[in-house]
Image (cartoon, rainbow, N blue to C red):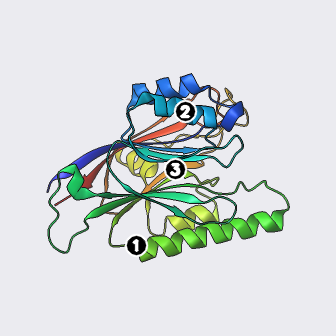
Amino acid sequence: MRNVKLRLMTANCLHRFGVEPSVLADFVRREAPDVLALQELSIAQARALESLGDYPHGTLDPRDDSFGLGLLLRHPAEMRRLRLPLRDAWIAEIDLRTLGASPRKGSAEALQITNVHLTAPHHLPPWRMLWQRYQQVHSLDTHLRRDAPVRQILLGDLNSTALFPAYHALCARFRDAAIIVAARNGGRTHATWAPRPGWRPLLRIDHALVDSSIDVESVRVLPLTGSDHSAVLVDVNVPCD
């Protein structure tokens, strides 16, 4: 079976008070992901990424608050917005044939990658936060089930550790890339969020979730200077035959 290798990156940039645009651009240039899923992306950060010229495909939807998103790709993809309460998600659908694949008749012909940023559990009032999170996860799950014949990857800041109902609901149809690698290597997963930029990370709330058809080669959690989140980089093999 022929596989296509892809490097994925998800990172929360802490908008205009967070990662310096030049620092973000240098980080992306050095790690060279094929797919870049960003949350809390500011206008200046988005301009710095555009200046790289390495990501001709995807969507930048930056804002100077916590609502900015970006999903950039090296490969052609059909982009669409998934309407969610508070923050929408962005979806990229890659035709595997554009990656040189020749899927057999009846097999999946597309890879769908979703970038999402769920409402933080400390948002007030609590009843509104709980309703938003429920509706966000329900809408995501409905969309993912409807598009199930394609191969699927979910990236982003889920504002959820492995103990949260939102995480468990999404992992009912996905596998956690970090847990796959930790179990295989006899290691452990690593926290991705700290109370302040530069502090020691305490919680793992940034995730890369993959469907059962996708092989996870490696997962790295790297500090991103200026953000309270670390970047998560995942190397995967997507079956294409």
Q: Which mark lies nearer to you, 1 or 2?
A: 2
Which quarter of the figure is the C terminus placed in?
bottom left
- In this rendering, position of residue 231 left or right of residue 227: left
Residue identified by numbered label 2:
47
Which quarter of the figure is the N terminus placed in?
bottom left
Compared with residue 134, is residue 240 higher up or lower down, i.e. above or below? above
At 67% from the left and 49% from the top, the residue drawn is 67
In the rendered structure, which disc, 1 or 2, sits on the residue that comes first in sequence? 2
Q: Position of residue 221 (x, y in %)?
A: 49, 36
- In this rendering, position of residue 98 left or right of residue 86: left
- Of residues 40 and 200, the one nearer the viewer is 40
Q: Which mark lies nearer to you, 2 or 3?
A: 2
In the rendered structure, which disc, 2 or 3, sits on the residue that comes first in sequence? 2
Compared with residue 127, is residue 78 higher up or lower down, i.e. above or below? above
Q: Amino acid at mark 1?
A: Asp
Residue identified by numbered label 3:
207
- For the residue labelled by badge 2, is the local secondary structure a helix, a strand or a loop? helix
Q: Position of residue 163 (x, y in %)?
A: 62, 59
Measure the C-alpha gap from mark 2 to mark 3.
25 Å
Measure the C-alpha gap from mark 1 to mark 3.
20 Å
Label 1 packing within 10 angstroms: few (<14), some (14-19), many (20+)? few
Q: Position of residue 184 (x, y in %)?
A: 35, 47
Q: Amino acid at mark 2?
A: Arg
